[in-house]
Image (spheres, rainbow, N blue to C red):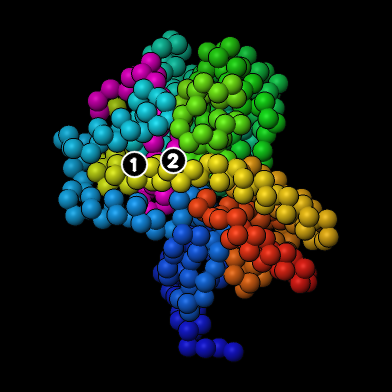
Amino acid sequence: MMTMESKTAMDLIQLEDKYGAHNYHPLPVVLSRGEGVHVWDVDGKKYYDFLSAYSAVNQGHCHPRIIGAMIEQAKTLTLTSRAFYNDTLGEYEKYVTNYFGFDKVLPMNTGAEAVETAIKLCRKWAYEKRGIAENQAKIVVCENNFHGRTTTIVSFSNDPDAQKNFGPFTPGFIRIPYNDTEALEEAMKQENVVGFLVEPIQGEAGVYVPDTDYLMKCRAICTKYNALFIADEVQTGIARTGSLLAVCGNCSCEKKCEKQATYAQPDILILGKALSGGVYPVSAVLANDEIMMVIKPGQHGSTFGGNPIAAKVAMAALDVVDEEQLALNARQLGDLFRSEMNRIISTTDLVLKVRGKGLLNAIIVNDTEDSLTAWNLCVALKDNGLLAKPTHGNIIRFAPPLVMTKEELLECVAIIEKTITEFKK
Ligand SMILES: *Cc1c(COP(=O)(O)O)cnc(C)c1O
């Protein structure tokens, strides 16, 4: 039955459709409020958010501490640009470098900008510290990578949608298979290879978790060939995978853990998304002095990068991760989630497998990649009160906010189980 309320939702969808570029294909739900692990649509229906804005809202929707920090700073000083000093940036820089264990930070806004920054930093380091001939530097990347949407970043994508008719592309990248250290070693033997840019778990590609020792081996290979190990933790970082960073391996402490035997320490660390708890665009590139100091005044920047609101928001967002032990929670709930999914999978033909780490998981739907089954399953999940989205055809990513309780997670498992049981292709 068509109610007044659902007409409003439809109006809002039509508004976006008519006036917005069609660069996304959203699930047909119109949200108007969020709190913790929940969001509500314009008709007042409540949902579990099982995507967290692609792992930006790890701290839960509208976390009072983060929102409080933002409001207070918004009333005081919002933007000075970097033409002048201000009284929040230095405090934030000290906080964030100490938190992650690097000498310096370069603040940006979006994930893609931070990736761009890392690429520029790596190249400049190569020319000025390694003596590579100008314009010859090459950076190794992986097949099925996702690092953002700028012209240079899509230049080394192999997703036809990301690339087609967006050329000409930026040269200087070598693509190798993911989770293949032999391919990395071979690539490193080529001339002028200066870095390896990698997602510790490939999120967009469908939550591909590499072998346990993959990142440690990559770290070692980069060291051997004097190339920079660049970790894009925009999606995997900030407690998502059950440790502060996915490169931390098995450690679930909330702070930097370079003393851990499983810590594959990056030379350049890229953060975004949950660095602000999803309330503001905040990204960062972290590195030690030997690398970061190659960038001199005027050589790189951003008007909004490191602005006072971003600085306060990021500190509050990281305080929450630490105080609420989100890494530990993600680890424990992630183990529970996968074991519950495996129990469900053993009773159905609809889902083939679950994979993931911490609370970054995906299920593989038993159908072809171009089928609508995963999409239809997400629509059915939505009808039952849980929001998730397919990534690459038949894969559904599950990434709830990390502030979820065990009881709430089990309620979500029950929704998923009911939806799968009742689903008809
Ligand atoms: C989302 C994402 C980006 C891009 O971040 P934007 O803020 O959308 O520009 C880069 N790398 C990874 C791994 C991501 O998941």
Using the image as rendered, state which of residue 5 and residue 258 is in the foreground: 258
Q: Is residue 136 visible?
A: yes
Query: In the image, 308: left or right of 334?
Result: left
Residue 219 pos. (x, y %): 58, 21
Task: Give the residue displayed 32% in from the left and 23% down from the top.
Answer: 295
30 falls in the magenta region: no
Q: Is residue 156 visible?
A: no
Q: Amino acid at mark 2?
A: Asp
Quadrant where the N terminus is found in the figure: bottom right
Task: Give the residue displayed 42% in from the left and 43% down from the top.
Answer: 323
Task: Give the residue displayed 42% in from the left and 68% down from the top.
Answer: 33
Quadrant where the C terminus is found in the figure: bottom right
Instruction: Magenta stretch: give its range.
Output: 270-298
Q: Amino acid at mark 1?
A: Met
Residue underneath mark 2: 322
Residue underneath mark 1: 315
Query: In the image, 206: left or right of 72?
Result: right
Against 221, is 421 above or below? below
